[in-house]
Image (cartoon, helix red, strand yellow):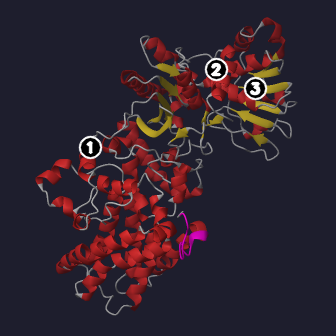
Amino acid sequence: MASKPGFLYKFPWEDWGNGKYLLYAPFVATVLMRWDDADNWAFHILAVAALRYLNAQLWQMASRIFAVSEKTRIQAKLLEFKQVDREQDWDDFILLQTLVMTLVHWYLPGYHTIPFFNATGMWHMLWFHVGPTEFIYYWFHRGLHHHSLYSAYHSHHHASFLTEPITGSCHPFLEHVGYTANFAIPMLGAWWMGTNSQVLIYTYLLGFDFLNAWGHCNFEIIPYGLFNAIPPLKYLLYTPSYHSLHHTQVHTNFCLFMPFYDYVYGTMDRKSDTLHESSWKGVRAADEKADVEFLAHGTELLSVFHLPFMGRDFSSRPFKASWKLYPLYPLAFAIFLVLRVFGKTFTAMKHRLGKTRLHVKVIPSWGLQYFMKSEHTRINNHIRKAILSADAAGTKVVGLGALNKAEFLNRGGAVFVEEMPDLKVRVVHGNTLTTAVLIKTLPKGLTQVFLTGATSKIGKAMAVYLAESGVRVMCLTPSAERFEALAASAKAEYRHNLTHCLRVADGADCDQWVVGKPLSAKDQGFAPKGTTFTQFVVPPIDEVRSDCTYGDLPGMKLPDKVVGVHSAMMDCDRRYVYACYAGAIVHCLEGWTHHEVGAIDPSRIDQTWDAAMKHGFTL
């Protein structure tokens, strides 16, 4: 928001939320009911709007896919939720221009019966843009930097020091009205000359959006040598680094797309060439060697759209597969097939805690694949390669998330440590802190719990810890041998607190269930009214009991000093992460030299919890 919002700052539909998209409804109805005019205007206005959204999506993906943008990144600052929220209505300008253009089509004499193509009109469009539009924009933009207009309007845009492709369209309503009038000149000019065409309208609108996103994408695209080979080009086409200086220096580089007027009127920033060169050569790219790499994976097919580069707004909120996503199942399945054959581990998020660099990487696998034995070798190979790559890069800790450390897959990561005894990087499953979080979420004064998955890594550690704390633990497992091994791991004087249960019904008298194995609706029916289901099972159990409370998977809130958090970690709330990721971070911050793989050492639970508290993690 601007520092002092002025007159007509808000769009008329700002308070409508997603209801604003109903403004497209008349156009959709016109097309479906075949009420369109001779120009098929409603169809074309919807088509060009769809292409403008697609253009923005592709640019957003490019700027957030680190493999594409990292080497020539311009600003190293990381994105935050605050900016994502401020820019969530970035598409208001598409709605505005859709309505304005339709009014022009209806009421401007001659702005109908538009031919498909007119070659002369394309030259007229270019002339009107290079001449009037660029010139007017330059001075209009400089005027917006006058302190009164800047505080009332344009400071909204400049609140984004770090730009993303859609940042270029985030302005107050009245400012966009001015822009729309100016940017209409090339299309109206061609109409005035009698050379307008459908191709011209598509070309100008899409070309404009393309160059606008280009200037705000925060990674350099234009080879520096191109301007040396063709010197006049630098007066005719701006670069992302050129416009980036406008956002950092504020009072230089005012041009729209052509720096010509900055050179003419003396507002070209002297550092433009230097920044262009250093960005293109990768000099400005931060040293992105991770201190911690956390290996995550997809859950259900639709979770692919929750990746930060797939859905900007969607990924900023906890993941939930709603009906709105169901039409995307075919696309999700196609992505699944491609990644199954060609996929490689990739970086999805980057955070920083002081000087500690934290990277979240994704193994190209979905939850269901982990339960297919035929997939185990492929998945473990991806994890192994990620560990070796991290070791070679000098990374300190590799954290294993969710099923990447499953007992049936690699024995909680122990397989990798045994195979590669000379690893410098520490492999951490993070389950010690996960166990600590589960224990701390249980009510104080607890006397008994019913524990499913009692012989899993987390289940064993919880059972022993709680039993040695004086809590009766009813351990559900069909194996007497496994229960005896579990009991033997507890101190002799506390073993009487461990009870072997063979049936889910044995928990009928306990209102504290700790769930480490899937529970059907029938199984949950044995829990008494008011039961709290504390769970660490992946995926979480279905919430079928309205008279019971269901806990989330163990998570922790990141310390306030962590920066670069602009996406929710799957179904976690904002700035919350799974406890195993927090465990990997704590392991690095504490400088612990042991691998945390295989079985959990219950004696380390309190130590790990205290370390997490010391570094600012909270529940």
- For label 2, count other residues whose C-alpha is less than 10 Å away and answer few (under 14), some (14-19) or many (20+): many
Q: Which residue is mark 2?
A: 457
- List x then y, in percent, for residue 329: 49, 52
Select label 1 or label 3 by which is in front: 1
Identify the magenta region: 3-15
Q: Which residue is mark 3?
A: 451
Query: Sequence order check: which comes first, mark 1 or mark 3?
Result: 1
Q: Which mark is residue 278?
A: 1
Q: Quadrant of the N terminus?
A: bottom right
Q: Residue at x 50, y 78 (%)?
A: 29
344 inside magenta stretch: no
- List x then y, in percent, for residue 389: 37, 25
Q: In the image, what residue type sits under mark 2?
A: Lys
Question: In terms of secondary structure, what is the magenta stretch mainly?
Answer: loop
Q: For marks 1 and 3, give the CA distance.
A: 58 Å
Q: Residue at x 55, y 18 (%)?
A: 411
Q: For marks 3 and 2, give the CA distance.
A: 13 Å
- List x then y, in percent, for residue 98: 43, 76
Q: In the image, what residue type sits under mark 1?
A: Ser
7 inside magenta stretch: yes
Residue 455 seen anywhere in this rendered image of the structure? no
Q: Please tell me whether residue 474 is drawn above or below residue 274 in the rendered image.
A: above
Foreground pick, 96 / 160: 160
Q: Residue at x 80, y 11 (%)?
A: 495
Q: In the image, what residue type sits under mark 3?
A: Leu
